[in-house]
């Protein structure tokens, strides 16, 4: 998915929010969707350039074979979906909720754990072994999986071949390297071309997330307890980031537009990010043939470290309140859970790398991409997808990420990392009370 708002919707469901949210629960649902017919499935999702056209394609395929089932795909922002679901779940009001909803992977556990029984366990009807393990794990609670895994945030190191060549490096020099080696390369690129290696908004933590998940570690232990002070992956990631900042190989940017502009305008030499950034990189036709993609660098010295990581991604859920549960589940199982040709189409049209492992065998995934020097980038991403370590996001990932983000500017300026970790831990524990 495109990088939208990754902060989630604030703190957990609890007493301090109930009073404020319960009153809003009775707001008219008509603001989001119209009345549904007996044979109409209502779907809530965001992004008219990505999720919505993919869902419309899926629904048209299903309706062609099942004419009595139609779909109302509503464009609702991620924040609105999160707020609406939490508000109505807290108040026990289900009127106006959709049949199917899209939720980002690192937000789902708070819904599953805070509001048990609100979603249909899809593992009762769909074989979850058909999907990437880490995607299934994100939506598994009490032994059941609730999602139909959709787009992957599987990550890669996008880089400018022309800048690297000017600094004396070939594509093979970027294959399966460590972050320490990438820093060395970044210093050479900066010295010989004047281009910083990467860009980063110091109000974000995407780089830290990419490093940490590649080791199978997360901000939370077993999804429940803070995993900050004794987390070698987190500490090493922060140390690596600080080294890069001190070396001047990170271009500091402000906001999403500034971030994407830093590489579409050719200011930086590389972009470590989820596959969903591909469309933005390819939005400048003049740069065709100047890009390649390598596996993510490894965080050396950390147990469990790999070259595979993820950032972002979302999945589909069926609401237990749906009057059309059987149809909704069958739709997800039939198209999203088994139609390989469908996945070729959304890969070509939306650049969506799905989580259905069988999709990798399709022609679109195997095709080379001239923009990336003829590399089979989609095949590579889909191969890496199956190797991303599983982590437990738990219910407090948004709070943990906000605590880390609060310390990023200080760390970039040379602040003491042990003290920063203590501050992160303290803020997270306070938010979890």
Image: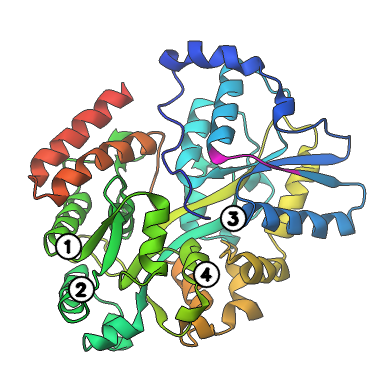
* Mark 4 surroundings within 10 Å by alpha-carbon count, few (fewer than 14), some (14 through 19), many (20 or more): few
Residue 112: image x %, image y %?
Answer: 52, 33
Residue contact at pointers 2 and 4, CB within 8 angstroms: no
Q: How far separated are the C-alphas under marks 3 and 4?
A: 23 Å
Residue that extends furthest to the right in the rendered view of this protein: 68
- Residue annotated with mark 4: 283
Tag 2's secondary structure? Answer: helix
Residue 387 visible: yes
Kindly identify which numbered label has been placed on residue 244: 1
The residue mark sitting in front, 2 or 4, is 4
- Residue annotated with mark 3: 150
* Residue drawn at x 65%, y 81% as measured from the top left: 363
Q: How far separated are the C-alphas under marks 2 and 4?
A: 24 Å
Q: How many marks?
A: 4
Q: Magenta residues, as a range?
A: 73-78
Q: Is residue 204 magenta?
A: no
The residue mark sitting in front, 4 or 1, is 4
Compare marks 2 and 4 and give the one earlier in the sequence.
2
* Mark 1 surroundings within 10 Å by alpha-carbon count, few (fewer than 14), some (14 through 19), many (20 or more): many
In this picture, residue 104 sits left or right of residue 273: right
Q: How far separated are the C-alphas under marks 3 and 2?
A: 34 Å
In this picture, residue 110 sits left or right of residue 413: right
Kindly identify which numbered label has been placed on residue 266: none
In this picture, residue 25 sits left or right of residue 73: left
* Mark 2 surroundings within 10 Å by alpha-carbon count, few (fewer than 14), some (14 through 19), many (20 or more): many
- Residue annotated with mark 2: 186
* Mark 3 surroundings within 10 Å by alpha-carbon count, few (fewer than 14), some (14 through 19), many (20 or more): many
Q: Is residue 218 above or below residue 367?
A: above
Compare marks 1 and 2 and give the one earlier in the sequence.
2
Tag 1's secondary structure? Answer: helix
Residue 222: image x %, image y %?
Answer: 34, 40
Compare marks 3 and 1 and give the one earlier in the sequence.
3
């Amino acid at each position: 998915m495109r990088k939208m708002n990754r902060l989630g919707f604030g703190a957990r469901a609890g007493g301090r929010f109930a009073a404020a949210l319960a009153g809003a629960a009775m707001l008219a649902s008509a603001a989001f969707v119209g009345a549904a017919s007996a044979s109409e499935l209502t779907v809530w999702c965001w992004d008219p350039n990505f999720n919505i056209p993919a869902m419309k394609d899926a629904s048209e395929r299903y309706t062609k074979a099942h004419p009595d089932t139609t779909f109302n795909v509503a464009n609702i922002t991620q924040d609105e979906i999160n707020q609406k679901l939490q508000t109505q779940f807290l108040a026990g009001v289900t009127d106006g909720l959709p049949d199917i909803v899209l939720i980002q992977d690192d937000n789902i556990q708070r819904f599953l754990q805070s509001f048990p029984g609100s979603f249909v366990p899809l593992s009762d009807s769909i074989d979850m072994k058909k999907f990437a393990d880490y995607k299934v794990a994100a939506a598994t609670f009490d032994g059941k999986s609730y999602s139909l895994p959709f787009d992957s945030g599987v990550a890669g190191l996008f880089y400018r071949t022309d800048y690297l060549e000017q600094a004396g490096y070939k594509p093979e020099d970027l294959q399966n390297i460590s972050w320490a080696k990438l820093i060395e390369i970044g210093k050479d690129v900066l010295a010989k071309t004047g281009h910083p290696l990467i860009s980063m908004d110091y109000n974000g933590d995407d780089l830290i997330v990419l490093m940490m998940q590649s080791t199978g570690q997360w901000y939370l232990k077993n999804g429940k307890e803070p995993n900050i002070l004794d987390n070698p992956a987190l500490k090493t990631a922060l140390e690596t980031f600080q080294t890069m900042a001190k070396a001047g190989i990170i271009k500091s940017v402000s906001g999403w537009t500034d971030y994407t502009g830093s590489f579409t305008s050719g200011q930086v030499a590389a972009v470590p990010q989820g596959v969903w950034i591909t469309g933005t990189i390819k939005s400048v036709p003049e740069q065709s043939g100047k890009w390649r993609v390598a596996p993510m660098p490894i965080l050396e010295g950390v147990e469990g470290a790999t070259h595979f990581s993820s950032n972002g991604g979302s999945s589909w859920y069926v609401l237990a309140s749906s009057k059309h549960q059987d149809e909704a589940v069958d739709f997800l199982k039939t198209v999203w859970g088994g139609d390989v040709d469908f996945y070729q189409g959304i890969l070509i049209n939306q650049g969506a790398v799905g989580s259905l492992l069988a999709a990798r065998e399709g022609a679109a995934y195997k095709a080379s991409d001239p923009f990336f020097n003829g590399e089979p980038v989609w095949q590579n991403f889909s191969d890496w997808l199956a190797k991303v370590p599983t982590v437990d996001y738990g219910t407090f990932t948004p709070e943990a990420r906000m605590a880390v983000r609060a310390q990023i500017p200080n760390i970039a300026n040379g602040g003491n990392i042990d003290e920063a970790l203590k501050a992160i831990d303290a803020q997270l524990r306070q938010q979890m009370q």
